[in-house]
Amino acid sequence: MTNKYYEFFCPVKVIAGKAALEHIPYELSGLGAQRPMIITDKGVRAAGLLEPVVAACEESDLEIASIYDDVPPDSSTTVVRDIADVYRSEKCDSIIAVGGGSAIDTAKAVNILVSEGGDDIAEYTGAGVLKRALKPFFVVPTTAGTGSEVTAVAVIADTEKSVKLPFTSSFLLPNAAIIDPRMTLTLPPHITAATAMDAMTHATEAFTCMAKNPLSDAYATAAIKKISTSLLTVMNNPKDADARLELAQASTMAGIAFSNSMVGLVHALGHATGAICHLPHGLCMSLYLPYVLEYNLESIRGPLSELLLYLDGPEAYAATPANRRAEAAIAAIRRLRDALYKECELPRTLKETGKVEESQLDDIAALALDDGSIMFNPREADLEDAKAILRKAWA
């Protein structure tokens, strides 16, 4: 599974650590920006997470021109248009996104409109449409999971047409990602668990799917090791800033890994389940990961065996016979899911979610086959294969 040719690209500056937020004004002024707009959601604001960001800016005499805090969980084209109108009327010159995947995707789309003009974001869908750099843009992630701060994609729903619009361009990448553990200290346990498993899946698929390469491998394995050693620490002690920072860095590393090596069938099934049953993305990733690894097992035995070292540590790796390491890696992921179920009842099967009907499995399978991620899965899957995996994941 070695690629003779590959490309690796990640031009996002990462500013990480316990006082990372305080560096935002310096970064903005370096790009000639003086009137940033903050784009976030109600939950982030209610959790008090905007305060350190605003304080950092005010201490440097930087004026925050506008705060938009009404981004919904599934952002839409109308929201993007509304925010762009506010940006223009308040004469903003840059964007700081503070939040999870939805706030970041929304900010990426807003940046297209305010940089390129117009008010119809649909004109810019697809790949290769944008031809030049957009306005200064910074991302402060508040969940350690999506990796959106280092990915060149955004997805925005067109609610009138009931479709999700994809945007892909290296110009969507922020100028910097600010990883500060203060931003994830208040994450509730079930979101901590689901978002960490989202990052775990990004890294595992990046390492086992078709487009893996030596550089993405380095980021993927480092991310898996950080999550394996820090996730349960955080579950037991949510205020552990060091372990929170480890998870946040792991999410960023996993984002860099998968945006350069792509993902596979876990994501195809997860996207389909999210669309049909409206389950959160991270939860879908956690649900399907072991079942898809079992399906792919004979195609990924080599890399999966290697992952045991990062999932379970050197002692367990050395004690496991080489021909059992791939199975042991899947067992380690299952043990982690069991521990998370015990800590916060993060579902391990579709049935445990209480939101999926057995009658929906065929529709999920059919939709998953249309998902672009499936192209990079190391083993071909047809409709019957997808249904069989879903039946295993059901109960």
Image (spheres, grey):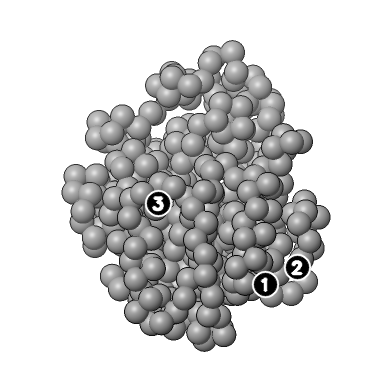
| Point 67% across, 42% down: residue | 157
Quadrant in the picture for residue 3 = bottom right
| Point 36% across, 49% down: residue | 46
Helix, strand or loop status at disc 1: loop
Disc number placed over residue 116 in the picture, else none: 2
Quadrant in the picture for residue 88 = bottom right
Q: Amino acid at mark 2?
A: Glu
Circle 2 crowding by C-alpha within 10 Å: few under 14, some 14–19, many from 20: some
* Mark-to-mark CA distance, 1 and 3: 25 Å
Give whichever of discs 1 and 3 has the lower sequence position.
3
Q: Are marks 2 and 1 in contact (CB under 8 Å)?
A: yes
Which residue is under mark 3? Answer: 44
Q: Amino acid at mark 3?
A: Val
Q: How many marks?
A: 3
Disc number placed over residue 228 in the picture, else none: none
Circle 1 crowding by C-alpha within 10 Å: few under 14, some 14–19, many from 20: many
> Can you tell which of label 1 and label 3 is closer to the viewer?
3
| Point 52% across, 53% down: residue | 103
Which residue is under mark 1? Answer: 134
Give whichever of discs 2 and 1 has the lower sequence position.
2
Using the image, determine if residue 142 lies above or below residue 293. below
Helix, strand or loop status at disc 3: helix
Percent x, y of residue 316: 25, 48
